[in-house]
C-alpha cells in the first residue's frame, strides 16, 4: 500500500501530538508542602501542607495563593529546556511563617497527559549567623 504524502504527514503529525506532554501554562491546584531547614535542622513551626492555587499565564506572569498559611505568589515563568517545563522566579509575601517571605527559584514540570504537574521551588538564605533553606513542593492538578 502506498501512502500519499499528505496522508503520511497527517499520521506523523498525529503520532507526534499524541506523545507531546501537556503545556505547563494555565491553572494548577493541589496540596503543597512548605518546609524550612535552619542550619541542618528542620523547623517544625514552618512545616505545613496546604492547598495552593497557581496560575501561569502564557505571557509569563505567575500568580498564586495558599490562603491557609497566608502565602501569596507573584513572579514570572520562562520556557524550560523542554516544552513541558517552565522555570519559575517568584516572590512569596504575606506568609504567616515570616521567613517564607522571599524570592524562590524552581520549575513546574508536566507529568504527562493526565493533568498532573510537579512543582519545586527553593530559596536559600546565607545570612549569618544561621543559614536557611526554604522549599515548596507539590504534585498539582489541572
Image (tube, rainbow, N blue to C red):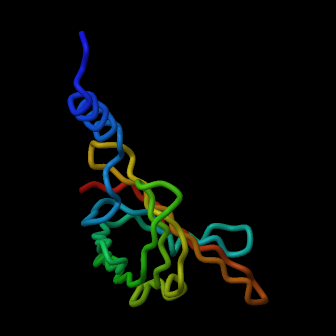
**Is residue 95 or residue 24 the one in the foreground?**
24
For image coordinates 67% across by 83% down, the residue present is 125
Q: Where's residue 64, x and y in %? A: 31, 77
For image coordinates 32% across by 56% down, the residue present is 23
Q: Can you say whether 53 is above or below 81 in the image?
A: below
Q: Can you say whether 126 is above or below 49 in the image?
A: below
Residue 84 position by quadrant: bottom left
Q: In this view, does 11 lie to the left or right of 88?
A: left
Q: In which quarter of the image is the N terminus?
A: top left
Q: Where's residue 101, x and y in %? A: 49, 87
For image coordinates 38% across by 81% down, the residue present is 73
Q: Where's residue 66, x and y in %? A: 32, 75
Q: In which quarter of the image is the C terminus?
A: bottom left
For image coordinates 65% across by 77% down, the residue present is 124
Residue ranking furthest to the top: 1
Q: Can you say whether 115 is above or below 136 in the image?
A: above
Residue ranking furthest to the right: 129
Q: Is residue 29 left or right of residue 126?
A: left
Amino acid at each position: 500500500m502506498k501512502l500519499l504524502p499528505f496522508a503520511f504527514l497527517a499520521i506523523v503529525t498525529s503520532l507526534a501530538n499524541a506523545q507531546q506532554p501537556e503545556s505547563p501554562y494555565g491553572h494548577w491546584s493541589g496540596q503543597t508542602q512548605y518546609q524550612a531547614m535552619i542550619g541542618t535542622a528542620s523547623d517544625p513551626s514552618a512545616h505545613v501542607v496546604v492547598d495552593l492555587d497557581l496560575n501561569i499565564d502564557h505571557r509569563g506572569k505567575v500568580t498564586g495563593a495558599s490562603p491557609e498559611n497566608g502565602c501569596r505568589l507573584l513572579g514570572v515563568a520562562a520556557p524550560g529546556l523542554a516544552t513541558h517545563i517552565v522555570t519559575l522566579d517568584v516572590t512569596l509575601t504575606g506568609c504567616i511563617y515570616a521567613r517564607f517571605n522571599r524570592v524562590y527559584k524552581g520549575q513546574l514540570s508536566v507529568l504527562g497527559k493526565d493533568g498532573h504537574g510537579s512543582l519545586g521551588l527553593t530559596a536559600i538564605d546565607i545570612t549569618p549567623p544561621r543559614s536557611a533553606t526554604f522549599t515548596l513542593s507539590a504534585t498539582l492538578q489541572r
